[in-house]
Image: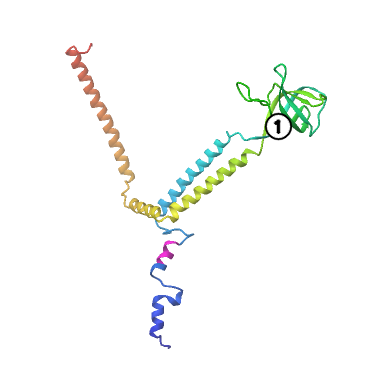
Amino acid sequence: MEAVSASNLAKRENGSESGGPSTGPRADAAIEHSGVGLYKYGQGYWVRTMTAIFAGILVLVTAMWAWDSLNAIKLPMREWRLSTTNPTGSTQVGQTLTLLKADVQPPVTLGTASVKAIEGSAITVGDVNITAPPSDTAPYSIASTTQMQSSDGAFSALVAQRSGIEIFDKVYLQMGVALLLLLAGCIAIYSLVGKMHNSVDFLIATDGEMKKVNWATRKVVIDSTYVVIGATFLIALILYIFDALLSRFFVWIKVLEG
């Protein structure tokens, strides 16, 4: 049998032949940061897990609130879809129309717009340029009192209804903000319950204290409930009796009317 030298024996004891020391700072670091990089993996399991779950619910609710709140934001309009009435003549895509405020005499020129699409009596316009100064109550804009007219007078129509086409679909903004909140929340939760030493040590200590709690049995809970209910009725009865006696006493000494 081959003899083992003192140097080889020392190497085996130090763990150099097995890839590193079994004790010391390096081994402690390996134990503390095992399991997807979690600090002190496996310790304080339930407290850390429930903390992560409830924090995740809070982040999810915040993302849903942000989604609903962004629904009220008004984005700039890229184009306007206008339903027209009383049209005379016809227009074509690319033609520039003059916008007039038709409910005043003489009509006030509001600005210009370019025809982008035509669908029956509905005309989609873009590149709206309002050149009229603001009125005393509000700035001028396309409304039901607006008249569209071509420069040569061959086309004219009144606007019946309008609907704006925003520069992009609002759902993309809602989705982006919600995803950013979810991502930031997940990173924060992972850091608090998995990486930050102070918060992780606090959760582990909390889990240790919870294990020391002497939880009541079912019989103790039921008996305590009976005691509380009985004491409540007893106190109520005593107060009722004292109230009745005091009332009769004050009536007897003519402080209160009977």
From the viewer's side, name the closer residue of 222 and 105.
Answer: 105
At horizontal 46% and vertical 47% (from top left) the residue drawn is 53
From the viewer's side, name the closer residue of 241 and 181.
Answer: 181
Amino acid under disc 1: Val
Quadrant where the N terminus is found in the figure? bottom left
From the viewer's side, name the closer residue of 52 and 117.
Answer: 117
As for residue 136 lying within the magenta part, the answer is: no
As for residue 29 lying within the magenta part, the answer is: yes
223 left or right, relative to 82: left
At horizontal 31% and vertical 37% (from top left) the residue drawn is 225
Quadrant where the C terminus is found in the figure? top left
Provide the secondary structure element on which disc 1 rests: strand
Q: Pointer 1: what residue? A: 128
* Residue stretch rendered in magenta on the structure: 27-33
How packed mark 1 is, by other alpha carbons closer than 10 Å (few <14, some 14-19, many 20 or more), is: many
254 left or right, relative to 76: left
Q: Is residue 222 above or below residue 205?
A: above
- In percent of width and height, residue 9 lies at 39, 81
- In percent of width and height, residue 148 lies at 75, 25
- In percent of width and height, residue 125 lies at 73, 32
Instruction: Answer with the quarter of the image where residue 106 lies.
Output: top right
Q: Is residue 149 above or below residue 54?
A: above
180 left or right, relative to 9: right
From the viewer's side, name the closer residue of 256 and 117.
Answer: 117
Q: Is residue 249 above or below residue 52?
A: above
- In percent of width and height, residue 45 lies at 42, 54
At horizontal 26% and vertical 27% (from top left) the residue drawn is 236
Q: Report the residue that reaches farthest toward the left.
A: 253
- Judged by its main secondary structure, the magenta piece is helix
Q: How is the image coloured?
A: rainbow
At horizontal 47% and vertical 53% (from top left) the residue drawn is 190
